[in-house]
Image: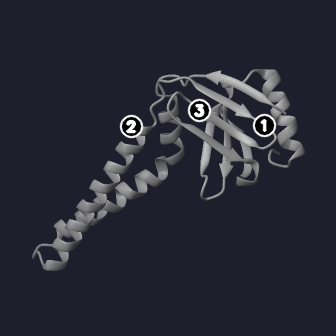
C-alpha cells in the first residue's frame, strides 16, 4: 500500500475540530478556576487561605487561557500538506515540518463526521485529517488495509 495526497485545510477547519473534541475538558478547567474564585471571594472575612485559593484560581485560569491560546495559534493551517500512507506508517509534511507515525503506535482508526482520526499511544496522541483529503478510491484502499490490520472496525 502506498497512498499519497496533497491537501490544504479549510480556514478554521482544524481549529473547529480541536475545539469540538476538547470542549468539555476546557469547560471543566474554566469551571474549576471560576468556582475557586467564587468560593474565595464569597467569604466575608477574607483570610490567608481564601487569598491563597483566589491566587491559585487566577493562576489556573491564566495558565489554561495561555495554553488554549498557544494551541489554537499552533493550529495554523495556511500551508499545503503532503499526506502519505505506507506499509510502515503514515507521514505528513509541509514546507517547514515533517511528522511520521509508525503503525505499531496507532491503536485504532475511526471515521467520524468527515474526519479520519488516528488514535495513537500516549506518546503519539491523536491525529486527525479531513476525509476529503483523499479520493474515494484511496479511502477504499486505505480502509481495506486498515481492516486487514485490525485497526479499523
- Which residue carries the number 3 mark? 93
Please tell me which residue is depicted at 61% across the width and 48% down the height of the picture. 126
Between the C-alphas of marks 2 and 3, the distance is 18 Å
Name the front one of labels 1 and 2. 1
Q: Position of residue 21 (x, y in %)?
A: 54, 44
Figure quadrant of the C terminus: top right
Q: Which residue lies furthest to the left in this view?
A: 45
**Mark 1 or mark 2, which has the lower sequence index?**
2
Left or right relative to 45: residue 2 = right
- Judge whether 77 appears above or below 108 on screen: above
Element at badge 1?
A: loop
Q: Could you say which is closer to the camera, residue 5 or residue 41?
A: 5
- Label 2 packing within 10 angstroms: few (<14), some (14-19), many (20+): few
Q: Residue furthest bottom?
A: 48
Q: Could you say which is closer to the camera, residue 58 or residue 103?
A: 103
Please tell me which residue is depicted at 59% across the width and 32% down the height of the picture. 93
Between the C-alphas of marks 3 and 1, the distance is 14 Å
- Which residue carries the number 1 mark? 86
Q: Find residue 41 and report its image quarter.
A: bottom left
- Which residue carries the number 2 mark? 73
Left or right relative to 147: residue 21 = left
**Mark 3 or mark 1, which has the lower sequence index?**
1
Q: Find residue 73 and report its image quarter.
A: top left
Q: Where is residue 113 in the image (x, y as percent from the top left)?
A: 65, 33
Amino acid at each position: 500500500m502506498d497512498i499519497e495526497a496533497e491537501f490544504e485545510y479549510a480556514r478554521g477547519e482544524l481549529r473547529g475540530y480541536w475545539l469540538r473534541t476538547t470542549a468539555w475538558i476546557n469547560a471543566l478547567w474554566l469551571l474549576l478556576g471560576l468556582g475557586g474564585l467564587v468560593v474565595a471571594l464569597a467569604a466575608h472575612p477574607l483570610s490567608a487561605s481564601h487569598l491563597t485559593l483566589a491566587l491559585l484560581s487566577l493562576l489556573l485560569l491564566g495558565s489554561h487561557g495561555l495554553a488554549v491560546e498557544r494551541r489554537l495559534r499552533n493550529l495554523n493551517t495556511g500551508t499545503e500538506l503532503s499526506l502519505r500512507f505506507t506499509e510502515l506508517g503514515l507521514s505528513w509534511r509541509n514546507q517547514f515540518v515533517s511528522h511520521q507515525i509508525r503503525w505499531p503506535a496507532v491503536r485504532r482508526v475511526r471515521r467520524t463526521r468527515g474526519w479520519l482520526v488516528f488514535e495513537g499511544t500516549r506518546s503519539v496522541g491523536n491525529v486527525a485529517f479531513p476525509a476529503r483529503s483523499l479520493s474515494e478510491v484511496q479511502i477504499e484502499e486505505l480502509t481495506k488495509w486498515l481492516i486487514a490490520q485490525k485497526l479499523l472496525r
